[in-house]
Amino acid sequence: MKLAKKRLVAVAATLAATALLAGCAGGGAQNGGPAAGGAQTLTLGILGEPTSWDPSQAHVGHSLQPYQIAYDTLILREPDGTLSPMLAEEWSYNEDRTVLTLELRDDVTFSDGAAFDAEAVKANIENLKNNNGRQAAQVAAVSVVEPVDADTVTITLSQPDPAFEYYLSQAAGLMGSPASLATDGIIATPVGSGPYVMDTAQSVTGSQLVFTAREDYWNPELQKFGSVVLKPYEELTARLNALLSNQVDATILDASTAEQATAGDLATIEDYQVDWQGLLLFDRAGETVPALGDVKVRQAINFAIDRDTMLTSILRGYGDPTQQVFGPDSGAFVDDLDSAYNFDPDRARKLLAEAGYADGFELPIAAGPGFESALAALSQQLADVGITVKIETVNVQTFLDDLTAGKYPVLYQNLFQGEPWVAINQIISTEAIYNPFDSTDPELQALIAEVQAGGDESADRAQAVNKWISDNAWFAPVYRIDQVYTYHSDLITVEKQVQQAVPSIYNYAPAA
């Protein structure tokens, strides 16, 4: 359970309310001016600005969007999740899917004038791999990056990675000018091939970051605004006020503020779900809580949860009850599993009695701040079947160390519902940071191996993994959460981005 052996793909989804949020926003035509993308300015309210613009320090979720303004990726992820050409025009694997060949565009330059080519791809991937960025795990399987010629590069993997093409549309695919990588200058100013460049004279750290459209950008179809302004607001109330006062065009809210942002021209993206929330029952061998070593006890916990009531009372209906950790857009979702543990306290009591816990037991549940209402409801529901909950507040500063050391037999958390291989390596495999007790089983390991070797069928094969962990009650999911992403519909249109906490920068357009 050492931190070094865990893949850090899930570090972003650490604690509490921040995991519930994601956003972007804009201010209509303010600060506008003639530029390649037109006169309108898009002003986005964000949770926080990057601490470094080096692409090796890029993150995912709501943290990816700012980098998309200044950097292109090798592969473009469409709003529905389809992978399309971007800096790489074509790509293909060898037979065992350990060598990926990319054919690159030959008409792209970085904002410092340098040409984009195969050497730039090599420099960027090695920069991410060597600089311990927050998403360095995305290139953990990369062993060699070899330019074949200026427009062709091969990437050799130590083992197949079904999510690698997806990663190349995310942090691993961001391309910066090689001369700028790992320099002091790139910390404050991005140097990419993307649709916009930072206006350093107008940008003020902590207040606003201003970007203007590049006149010579290779793909003007993605360049829909003359400028983009990012305004950081860590506090939810500040984002709401900025939206209501027209300081921003769009931002991320939550269920508690959604009703306040329904007046006038404000609209919210519909059917936008990215995260699930619930219990991670880590101690499946019963090392510290013996009762959890019995699958019937873990199943009883699932049957004891009244998900519909919790959704209504806590999220005000902004979400959907769920009983599985893979999302509907992942390909690993199984319809029947969302009725496998329908609320049935009598069945929960029966299972507990069969496991020898008719008199109940004490269940410690660790959680960060922001989950008080959910924990109160769970405590009451579990008490109704004889389980006494003991709430333990996690130490935010030592959370990762405590997690990987196995300090928490049960954790209540908010986590990303991503691509199947991403989810497996986040919460299921022995490499996963959210599997601190290294739970496994020969049958499960065989199913995971099939996913890894599955190629285009990986998502379908992950359905068997989903069913196995559901049958064995590794988790007790409660609900999927609606992203309350709200915008001024008279100024802009916005399209959701599947499995991403906020829309990609390419998903915005002027309303007219």
Image: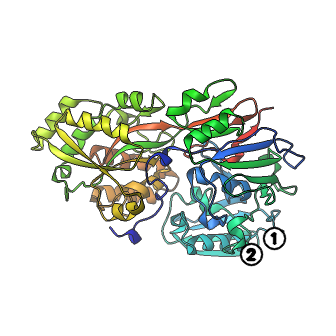
Residue 264 shows in the view: yes
Q: Is residue 351 above or below residue 47?
A: above
301 on left or right of 374: left
Q: Nearer the viewer, residue 287 or 392?
A: 392
**Residue type at the position of mark 2:** Ala
Name the residue that disc number 2 marks. 179
Query: Does any portion of residue 323 appear in the rendered image?
Result: no
Residue 336 coordinates in the image, percent (x, y): 36, 34
Q: What is the crowding at mark 2: few (fewer than 14 residues within 10 Å), some, or many (at least 20)?
A: few
- Which element type, helix, strand or loop, lies under badge 2? helix
Give percent across and percent down for residue 406: 29, 62
Picture residue at 30% right of the left edge, 49% below the top: 474
Q: CA distance from mark 2 to mark 1?
A: 8 Å
Pointer 1: what residue? Answer: 114
Q: Kindly report which numbered mark, 2 or 1, lies closer to the viewer in this rendering.
A: 2
| Between 482 and 255, the one nearer to me in the picture | 255
Query: Which numbered disc covers residue 290?
Result: none
Which type of secondary structure does the marked residue at label 1 adopt?
A: loop
Side (left or right) of 361 relative to 301: left
Where residue 195 sits, quadrant-wise, is: bottom right
Q: How is the image coloured?
A: rainbow
Quarter of the figure with residue 302: top left
Mark 2–mark 1 contact, CB under 8 Å? yes
- Where on the picture, by quarter, is residue 199? bottom right
Where 267 sits versus 35, above or below?
above
Of callouts 2 and 1, which one flags the residue occurring earlier in the amino acid sequence?
Answer: 1
512 to the left or right of 140: right
Name the amino acid type tagged 1. Answer: Ala
- In the depicted structure, whether residue 87 falls above or below residue 315: below
Image quarter in which the C terminus is found: top right
Nearer to us in this view, 13 or 300:
13
